[in-house]
Image (cartoon, rainbow, N blue to C red):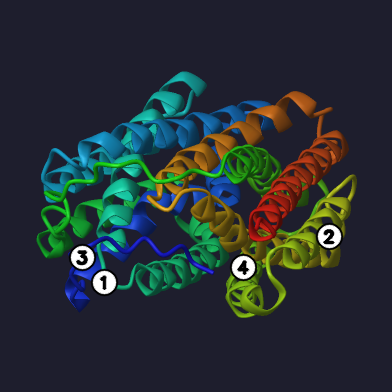
Amino acid sequence: MLVNMTTPGAQRLDVRALSAAVALGTLGALTIMIVPGFVMLVGAQSGLDDRRLGFVASWDINTTAAAIGVATFLIARFNWRHLALLGTVLIALGGLGTAVSHGYTPIVAARICAGLGEGLAIAVSFAALGSAANPDRAFGVYLVFGLSASAAVLALLPWLQGGFGSAAVFVGIAAIALGSMTLLPWLPQRSPASASSRDGAASVSKELAISGLVGVFLYFIAQGAMWSYFERIGNASGVDRIIIGQAMGLSSFAGMGGALLAFTVVTRLGRVLPLIASGTVSLVSFWLLRGHVTAAELVIAGVLFNFGWNLAQPLLSGVCADADAQGRVVVAMGCIQTVGFGMGPALAAVMLQGQDFSRAAGMSAAVLLISLLIVLGGLKMQSRRILAVSTLP
């Protein structure tokens, strides 16, 4: 289920505020959502090898994570609209900078600029969505819209890149960022509960907090490593770029199915069985992506990849939410998962042997398995503690 982050005194976001928050969050997370397509664009423009492309993606995503962490403190002190404005400007500058850059160093510099803006955009979006009277529903709208938008973008990217070139696509992203400024007046200026005191620490379950955060960190390393190189794996195997784009688009649509399934089954089955199922699906996807892949294998792997990923995400969020009623662990999770996702491409880059991705796939499979074992271990310890407390006289 989605995490309930309702705060006392929260007000219902109107349609315009919700639309602005969803659009801003999707803009901020776009690089993460379409990272295989992003790698394709940068690779086509710059000619960088696969190893350096992985490092470019990591710089962008890790900068985003750092910006989210800093913004956690800024949103309580500054007008959200001003922070969002700064974020969109930085995204636009980063897009334009990427469009005119061809070497490794200038591209990294441009993506650091964009990553700072992306982090601010995500932080303000999540703060606004979390201030809704029913944040579960607000985040649900964001999830469905974001996955739909990323699926459409991934499907169109091969045509856009082939017809107009990578630079034109990055200019287009910059234009979208500038255009999104028209929505910023619809955002709340601050949280309705920002003036409320939150003295008194809530009880934190150390078992769930540690296992949840460590598990999420490792889980997103595995996902980031394979998703970042998804397009390159297909390209190395000679799969047509149009089919690669269709596989990435279908993959995002499959992710919506995984998320919806998680919402449906968690109340009846709990988290353990769905987490095991998601891990099994992901491992099969990784197995299909090792070595030479056919077009059919790439499509199947893409569908399984995002289905398993988005089946697990709400469950992992629920574990972190249960660890701390005040939501501090969930906030930390947002930063940690972005760091993990950013580290994934860099670790995979170190494992590459030419255009052979088998070692990277094996590393990702092992890391994902360890992450789920850690989370399941934390859930088991928590269950034992609850059982022990309930049997006290």
Label whose residue precedes the other's in the sequence (1 or 4)? 1
Where 3 sits versus 104, above or below?
below
Q: CA distance from mark 3 to mark 4?
A: 30 Å
Q: Residue at x 62, y 26 (%)?
A: 52
Q: Is residue 257 above or below residue 367?
A: below
What amino acid does circle 1 point to?
Ala
Which label sits on residue 276? none
Which residue has dot 1 on it?
A: 133
Residue for point 35% across, 41% down: 201
Q: x, y percentage for residue 392?
A: 66, 55
Question: Disc 1 vs disc 2: Cβ atoms closer than 8 Å?
Answer: no
Q: Please tell me which residue is depicted at 46% across the width and 62% down the height of the picture.
A: 3
Mark 3 or mark 4: which comes first in sequence? 3
Q: Is tag 3's residue or tag 1's residue first in the polypeptide sequence?
A: 3
For mark 4, what is the residue? 255
Q: Which mark is residue 280?
A: 2
Q: Is residue 100 visible?
A: no
Q: Does residue 297 sit above or below 69 in this rendering?
A: below
Whether residue 18 sits left or right of residue 143 in the image: it is left
110 left or right of 391 in image: left
Mark 4 or mark 2: which comes first in sequence?
A: 4
